[in-house]
Image (cartoon, rainbow, N blue to C red):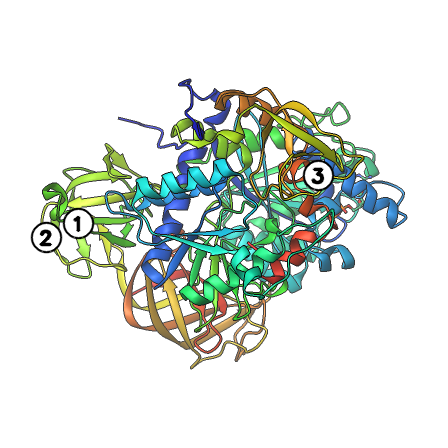
Amino acid sequence: MDSVSNAGEQPPAALRMDILRFATAGSVDDGKSTLIGRLLYDSKSIFTDQLEAVERTSRMRGEETTNLALLTDGLRAEREQGITIDVAYRYFATPQRKFIIADTPGHIQYTRNMVTGASTADLAIILVDARNGLTEQSRRHAFLTTLLRVPHLVLAVNKMDLVGYDQAVFDQIRDEFTSFAAKLDIGDLTFIPVSALHGDNVVDRSASTPWYNGPSLLHHLENVHIASDRNLKDARFPVQYVIRPHKSTDPELHDYRGYAGQVAGGTFRAGDEVLHLPSGFTTRIKAVEVAGEPVPEAFPPMSVTLLLDDDVDISRGDLICRPNNQPAAAQDVEGMVCWMSADRPLAPRTRLIVKHTTRTVKGIVTDLHYRIDVNTLHRDESATQLGLNEIGRIKLRLTQPVFADPYSRNRETGGLILIDEATNSTVGAVVITEAR
Amino acid sequence: MRTDYALSQLDVLEAESIHIFREVAAEFERPGLLFSGGKDSIVMLALAERAFRPAHIPFPVVHIDTGHNFPEVLQFRDRRVAELGVRLVVGSVQKSIDEGRQVDESGRWASRNRLQTMTLLDTIEEERYDALFGGARRDEEKARAKERVFSFRDEFGQWDPKNQRPELWSLYNTKIRRGEHIRVFPLSNWTELDIWAYIERERLQIPSIYFAHERDVFERDGILLADNPYVSRGDDEDLFRATVRYRTVGDMTCTGAVASSAATVPEVIAEVAATRITERGQTRADDRASEAAMEDRKREGYF
Ligand SMILES: Nc1nc2c(ncn2[C@@H]2O[C@H](COP(=O)(O)OP(=O)(O)O)[C@@H](O)[C@H]2O)c(=O)[nH]1
């Protein structure tokens, strides 16, 4: 016997939870590693051999306490320099949810890494040291989080133990941040006083903060409602791949033509009238399939295959939507760009490869409206170029249209990446504000 | 009709992986899928199949054969490949040694783990692969926690961890020059428990060595190694019979078994959920060399 079949039992409820992706940001020494270490530790996601390795290294370096940051810094250079350079992804689960943490470096020189981590996050935790209050860095993290439209933001006021669990300190930071946040478009904002080191309000509510009536951080992560963050109104299906079985022996499959892709918005059911872009042709959905089997309905983020009533000439890069609700077929795109190249700046006339959903086209920067100071939000309209990690508003002219929505409406059809034609590096990310 | 529009974690992970497979099939000319016969590559192959159904998987399956495999795993590989009707490409470490391209390690700690890298890179060059799927997961190891889903390799097959392409949303940069390639990891966001839950849900077949069985083993460095022709056992390393199973499947020389009585998938899931030791820490001698063993091997072009 070389293999074993599974006995047929239902998977336990614990294996049928949903996923919350969250990003963490904070300045050096605000306690981010300690907080993540605690979440992992208390959810039993740190294994004894990992802990032993960290303890060994801490001892070797002559550190007094076990340095939990060693657990989260994955690269040799990071361990040597004691800093986080790149995004690291970590995983833990409770009976309610599976969590994917994008642990992002906080320093301004790694802004592009934070933007990367935030791009897929449902929630962001920004750490603040209670003793220092809001810093320039916390404002920048909040700005980037809202730029990338992370729907839920948690401001974790850490090291409450060092300010005697004083409500006044917490209130002051909360009020200051609230008035700053009024300038930003933040969806859902939650403030939690914590001590990552001692565990106050991390997993359980703390007796040391009787004045705080909100949830513990983990309770909030487990219960924050994310299903409605997805766009279920605007049906958007970027065609990714055409499935043609070429099985001449099977007459059933001879004419099979399936349009495969991941739903970027709305719902798709058999019988729905749909419109194809760029042709403008309308037809109906014959069937929605997952792995060759029909399913009643497709919605984000399902990867499905659509079969259509009529033979339309459809290929990768096209988009299927509803006749009465179409994205713009845009050759002129306005948006906020985060420039990610150290080799060359972005300036008007810069030529780039543009990847948007499943479509890759060429583009040229026709305008740089301003550079934004990510710390003060000041707009510098005299800027003539953007350097590494700088953010500004640009206009792009494309050789072919892309089927786009404003990013504020749809994170899938509203984002694009810029690729350098010469080096093939990813050099920028754009959130679209206007597409024509 | 559903009203909540919620998907389970396995559905979300599956959708993400299928998206990745289709993206590669659409954008690369010569992809291949690395298959070891282990549980992760079995799940990866099942996902690839689902991504293209009712069509066949549009790329070959590639196995880097060290010559030190568990026989159960090779049998399993051949059966799966026949079922799916895909082409199997085998890169043989033994052949590289016979041709004098590399030298077998000798002595008590001899392993072909490092030698695999060269055979892998040779195979990539011979077959002119521009993208290779690997079953690595980010939860496995700390260097992997940093790796992109689409991970760029230069013409020497090397990974430069400090110079990775930013990866935003699900927009993957697939641009490369001739001779370069991309390693693609569709299971990046899966954990060991997700893999088992998926094996359970999809009723996937897996090699028998993943379940409890009796075997002659000996202990080395706290790892239980199977008695096998490829390892020279010291006088102080006594054989004993034990009920064990494998948590990972690699070479017989460096993959350890764990004492276990878990004989079914649900029992394995219960065991994995309760364990306090990582799979690589418990069973892989190759990762114990140093704090950065995996990072160093990956830089050279390892899986
Ligand atoms: N007293 C106290 N110290 C903390 C707390 N959180 C973190 N620290 C300490 O602050 C220092 C920096 O923490 P670390 O997690 O490494 O910060 P990171 O740079 O943001 O990852 C360490 O010495 C921690 O032990 C806290 O809640 N209270």
The label on residue A311 is 2
**Foreground of the two, B125 or A339:** B125
Residue flagged by tag 3: what amino acid is it? Gly
Query: Which circle's residue, 3 or 2, is located before the other in the chain?
Result: 3
B21 in relation to A171, above or below: below
Q: Indicate if the residue with disc 3 has its beta carbon within 8 Å of ligand 1.
A: yes
Contact, mark 3 vs mark 2 (Cβ under 8 Å): no
Amino acid beneath label 1: Arg
Of badges 1 and 2, nearer the viewer stands: 1
Q: CA distance from mark 1 to mark 2?
A: 9 Å
Numbered disc 2: secondary structure: loop
Mark sitting earlier along the chain (3/1): 3
**CA–CA distance in space, label 3 to label 2:** 55 Å
Residue holding disc 1: A257
Quadrant containing ligand 1 reads top right
Q: Are marks 1 and 2 in contact (CB under 8 Å)?
A: yes
Residue A265 in picture, x, y percent from top left: 32, 45
Whether residue A235 can be seen here: yes
**Callout 1 environment at 10 Å: few (<14), some (14 to 19), or many (20+)?**
some
Residue at label 3?
A37
Q: Amino acid at mark 2?
A: Asp
Rendering coords of residue B300 (x, y %): 61, 62
Give the chain of mark 3: A
